Amino acid sequence: MVKESDLSEASRNSLVTSYDFEKFNDQPWTPTVAAKERRIAIVSTAAIHAPEDRPFGYGAFHWRSFPASQREFWCSHNSVNWDRTGLYQDINIAYPIDRLNEACEDGRVGSVASTHYAFNGGTYEVAKYEPYAREVAGLMKEDGVNTVLLCPV
C-alpha cells in the first residue's frame, strides 16, 4: 500500500476531500493477541457470494456469509472500473482463504473462522454499512473470532 506522503499533491487533496478519515492519537482499543491465538475471519468488499445466493444489487449495503469450505463464488460487483478477470482466475485475490488456511496449517495463526463474509463495496456512503457491520461483528463474536482480515476491493 502506498504511503500518503508518496502520493502526488493532487492525489492527497483528492483523498482529503473524498473521505472523512478517523484520526487516532491514542493506543489501540483492543488487546494485543498473539498470532497463534488468533481466530481469523475474512470480510471482503468484492460482492462475492455463493452461486445460489441472490446477487448484490446496486447500492446494496447488506452482507452475504459463506462457510470456510465454500470455493465456488459469483461476483455481483458490476462496476466497469474494476477488472474481475483475476478474481475469476484466483478467488484469493479478493478472498484469501487458501492463504489463511496455509497460515493456520503451518502454525502461523491459531484458527480459521467457520464463516466468512462479503459486502458490496465501492460506495462513499459508508455510514449505511454500520448496522450490517454490527450484525456481522456479533456473528463473528459468536464464532470466537478475535481478528478480521479485511479485503477491500
Image (cartoon, rainbow, N blue to C red):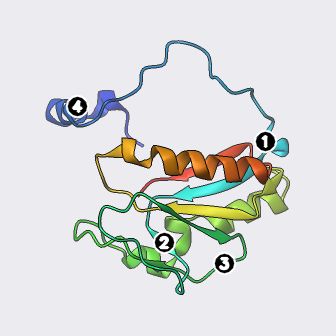
Give the residue number, with chain letter if any, for mark 4. Answer: 12
Q: Earlier in the sequence, mark 1 or mark 4?
A: 4
Q: Earlier in the sequence, mark 1 or mark 3?
A: 1
Q: Which residue is at 47% across, 43% downward?
A: 130
Mark 3 or 4, which is nearer the eye?
3
Mark 1 or 2, which is nearer the eye?
2
- Mark 1 nearby-residue class (10 Å; few <14, some 14–19, many ≥20): some
Considering depth in this image, is 119 or 8 the residue closer to the camera? 119
Residue with the most extreme bottom position: 52
Q: Residues under labels 1 and 4: Cα distance?
A: 34 Å
Query: Height in image: 18 above or below 63?
Result: above
Q: Which residue is at 37% across, 78% downward?
A: 85
Which percent across, then down, holds residue 87?
A: 45, 74
Q: Secondary structure at mark 3?
A: loop
Give the residue number, with chain letter if any, for mark 1. Answer: 35
Give the residue number, with chain letter if any, for mark 2. Answer: 48
Look at label 3 and name its amino acid: Gln
Q: Which residue is at 63% across, 80% downward?
A: 71
Q: Residues under labels 1 and 3: Cα distance?
A: 24 Å
Considering depth in this image, is 17 or 131 the residue closer to the camera? 131
The image's mark for residue 112 is none
Q: Residues under labels 1 and 2: Cα distance?
A: 27 Å
Looking at the rendering, which quadrant does residue 69 occupy? bottom right
Look at label 1 and name its amino acid: Ala
The image's mark for residue 70 is 3
Query: Height in image: 14 above or below 42?
Result: above
Looking at the rendering, which quadrant does residue 120 occupy? bottom left
Q: Secondary structure at mark 2?
A: strand
